[in-house]
Amino acid sequence: MRNNTTHSTCYMCTEDCPITVLSDGEDILSIQHPDCVRAEGMLEQRTSRLRQVNARIRSSLQDPWREVSRGQAVSATARALLEVRERYGAQAVAFVAGFTKEARPYLQRLAHCFGSSHYLTESSCCFGSCFVAASVTLGKEYDYFLGPSRTRYSATRCRLVWSTNPTESRLPYDKHHLITDASEWATIVVDPRRTPLAEAARIHLQLRPGTDGALALGMAQVILEEGLEDKEFLRSYAHGLDAYQRYVRGFTPDKTARITGIPPERIVAAARLYATSRPAQITISACATTHHSNGFQNHRAILLLAALCGNLDIEGGNRPWGHRCREASVDLSAEEVASLGPPLGAQKHPVFVEHQGEGQAMLLAEAIESGDVRAVFSIGMNVMMWPNSHRLRKALGSLEFFSVCDFFETPTGDLATTFLPAATHLERQALIVSGSGRVQYRPAAVAPLGDAMGDTELIFEMAGALGMDGHFWGGDIHASFDARLAGVGLSFESLPASGEPLFVDIREPEERGYLRNGFGTPTGKVEFVSTILEDAGHEGLPLYREPYWSPVSTPGVAEDYPLVLTSGGRSKNYTHSQGRQLETLRSREPKPRLQMNPSDAEVRSIGDGDEVRLSSPLGAITLQAWITDVMPPGVVSAPHGWADADVNLLIPDAELDPISGFPPFRSSLCQVHRLDGPGSSKDGTHHE
Ligand code: SF4
């Protein structure tokens, strides 16, 4: 047998790192990949004995599964969706994408061609709020995230790193330049946890989770009070500065200290350092600032610091992402999509839905409960992604039809009536157009096992079974790649079939593009008071509000649940809820562990490694205690994505962020007891 070498990409997370796969045409012999723990699980993901490679259907959740051929499963799914459309209309069907972004353009097109505007993705609780906040405030996305800033801007003199932890979230992890080179520039780290980056920083602002907005406004107060702002920039490019200045006056260092828990002199020092060390760059987590009941405005308050100090679109500051390499959309036209009816969340969260171009998935349980949604077609969906996840579990179990596509049996698959086995990234083709200019056709390195199929192949087969082949390039996937590549002036034929990448030149545009074009907001300026938010009935200023549950906003809840709960901190071993079935990864981190400060543990007689009950008014889960002074007293941190200890059971969904609809994963309230200790037995009641 001849050995084949495929230039491929890793998709154990969405970074698409280059890998080289050697196979004998049937089995994989070896994989060269970056030094990354998660990548070590990819071969096992394909060959795991737990993997499900057969299609299955059942009439109801009470019936046993029946194995069928892939074609039969696709036909049964299409029939069920058409029946629901016939009875209730196309809007009764929602199309949901979890992990795998590769096939999303096609899922969006499938939903819209089917006649439903309910195309929903995990962007409803990840990244999306940051993008929309930047768009309404600055007119476009800016380079705030860890990836791009890792290679550019040697001119930067100060880095304000806000709640992001490269040690666990970004290659090369603890060798990340933000940590190893921290002494080369002034680093300010905002984080409730004492992470390795916080340890290396000149100033660590250890705030109470959810008070990011108050801290940003408090820093702005110092900057304006001391006249450290960039007056010339603001004179020409600020909208609403007077109202903003009046508002931030209230956030004196003492008041900000009371809200955030950070000593006032440290807030003042950080504000002075950031404002006087230009150019300075802000690096923000894609989620941590927005996973709060006031996350959108908190995030805006942080973005505005860059404008206040004239650090936008200058070398060493935060530059626009507008020049990125982008593929062409394969969605229907805006008019055609608008004619389908309002997507989920269009009334409650109109700014998010309009700017994100999709529905707000966090409202799915409500839509099912009200009977608006009767069937769901999903790929890589995970019920643990939702706050108060019990509620969605119950709602999904009541659907008339629910299909799930995945590698493994999951808590979501348990609620389905059709299971479609997914091909892993080693077994499926993809077109990769990365923002950094890399364009690559990734061929399948080997054929899928059993009846597993690539997400794109599944969607094209579904389109055929639904009678929509005409909308899907006559079933020709490579023709669809041509349509997407039109955005970067390439064709499928021009890409190497062996998988080697091409690189599109995306040289940086000149600095200070706003001198020619202004900012892309309605006023053409940086909007300290957002006109888009005002028009939608929201507060235009970046108003600070306490988290929905906090010791300040709900002292009654805090009486029984006195600890602040933050969740969702990244682990380098896992991408969200994935990989728990893989021994390669699970052996490194076998159990979910709750980080808590020694003082909080001591008063509860909890020792390191003890089993503990973590509870909120919504329920309780069991984890292992990890006693560490990484945590400040009064705050505990729980990991997400563990099916047997799903922390999102405990997170309220009663008050999502009013603008974005994002849930408060990072700031809530809880109590902790030793499992066999006093008080633990009365926990665990699930309140509907
Ligand atoms: S899991 Fe690691 S190697 Fe794989 S894409 Fe992500 S960062 Fe890259």
Image (cartoon, rainbow, N blue to C red):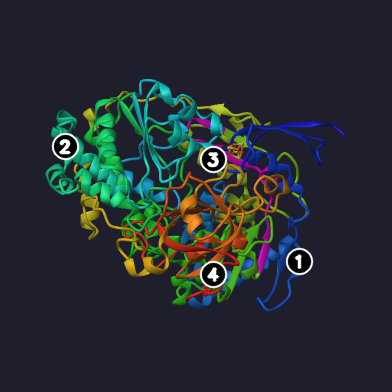
In what quadrant does ligand 1 lie?
top right
In the displayed structure, 206 sits above or below 317; it is below
Describe the element under mark 4 as helix, strand or loop. loop
* Number of marks in the rendered image: 4
Q: Is residue 15 left or right of residue 45?
A: left
In the displayed structure, 657 sits above or below 250; it is below
Res. 168 mark: 3
Give the mark nearer the N terminus: 1 vs 4. Answer: 1
Magenta stretch, residue numbers: 418-439
Q: Position of residue 450 (x, y in %)?
A: 78, 54
Describe the element under mark 3 as helix, strand or loop. helix
For label 2, the residue is: 224
Q: Position of residue 686 (x, y in %)?
A: 51, 74
Q: Label 3 crowding class (10 Å Cα cut-off): few <14, some 14-19, many 20+?
A: some
For label 1, the residue is: 68
Give the mark nearer the N terminus: 3 vs 2. Answer: 3
- Give the spatial CA distance, label 3 vs label 2: 35 Å
| Marks 4 and 3 in Cβ contact (< 8 Å) | no
Of circles 1 and 2, the one toward us is 2
Amino acid carrying mark 2 in the image: Leu
Of circles 4 and 3, the one toward us is 4
Amino acid carrying mark 1 in the image: Val
Give the mark nearer the N terminus: 1 vs 2. Answer: 1
- Give the spatial CA distance, label 2 vs label 4: 51 Å
Q: Is residue 416 visible?
A: no
* Residue 420: in magenta span: yes
Tell whether circle 4 marks a residue whose Cβ is less than 8 angstroms from ligand 1: no
Amino acid carrying mark 3 in the image: Glu
